[in-house]
């Protein structure tokens, strides 16, 4: 990749939180502090678990990365909520797999 080329990486809210915290709040500009405040309020899973979940959702359940990131951001609690994120997909995922995904998300959710 050349020096002037940009690279895009999709990050879940927990990953953004981890990244901003690693910089240190005292080193963040106003926009970054607002972002850290936002992701701190809305993160529903630990960053390490978010990374694991992303891999599982993409590789084991064959969910597109974009959809998987949004699922991790929202951590749906029911099959109906989960289906909202998969509605635009080209393939149908059977109910048994959806139940396993919801169970996996529930096992990894931060209890607040």
Image (tube, rainbow, N blue to C red):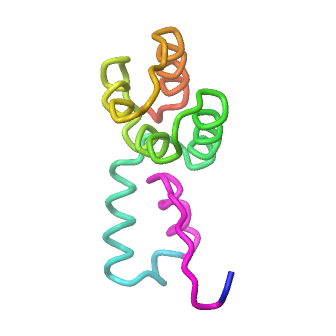
Q: Is residue 84 above or below residue 70?
A: above
The residue at the point 50 percent across, 27 percent down is: 105
The answer to if 20 sits in the magenta stretch is yes
Extreme-front residue of the structure: 90
The answer to if 8 sits in the magenta stretch is yes
The residue at the point 37 percent across, 17 percent down is: 79
The residue at the point 32 percent across, 59 percent down is: 38
The residue at the point 50 percent across, 57 percent down is: 11
Q: Is residue 70 above or below residue 18?
A: above
| Count of marks, rendered view | 0
Q: On the rendered structure, is 110 left or right of 60? A: left
Q: Position of residue 81 (x, y in %)?
A: 31, 25
| Towards the viewer: 26 or 59 | 59
Q: Give the quadrant of the C terminus.
A: top left
Q: Is residue 98 above or below residue 8?
A: above
Q: Give the quadrant of the N terminus.
A: bottom right
Q: Which residues are magenta?
A: 3-23
Extreme-top residue of the structure: 96
């Amino acid at each position: 990749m050349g020096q002037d080329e940009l690279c895009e990486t999709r990050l879940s809210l927990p990953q953004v939180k981890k990244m901003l915290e690693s910089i240190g709040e005292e080193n963040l500009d106003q926009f970054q502090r607002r972002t850290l405040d936002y992701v701190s309020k809305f993160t529903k899973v630990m960053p390490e678990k978010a990374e694991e979940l992303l891999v599982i959702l993409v590789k084991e359940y064959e969910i597109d990365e974009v959809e998987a990131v949004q699922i991790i951001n929202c951590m749906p609690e029911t099959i109906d909520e989960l289906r909202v994120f998969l509605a635009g997909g080209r393939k149908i995922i059977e109910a048994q797999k959806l139940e396993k995904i919801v169970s996996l998300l529930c096992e990894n959710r931060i209890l607040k």
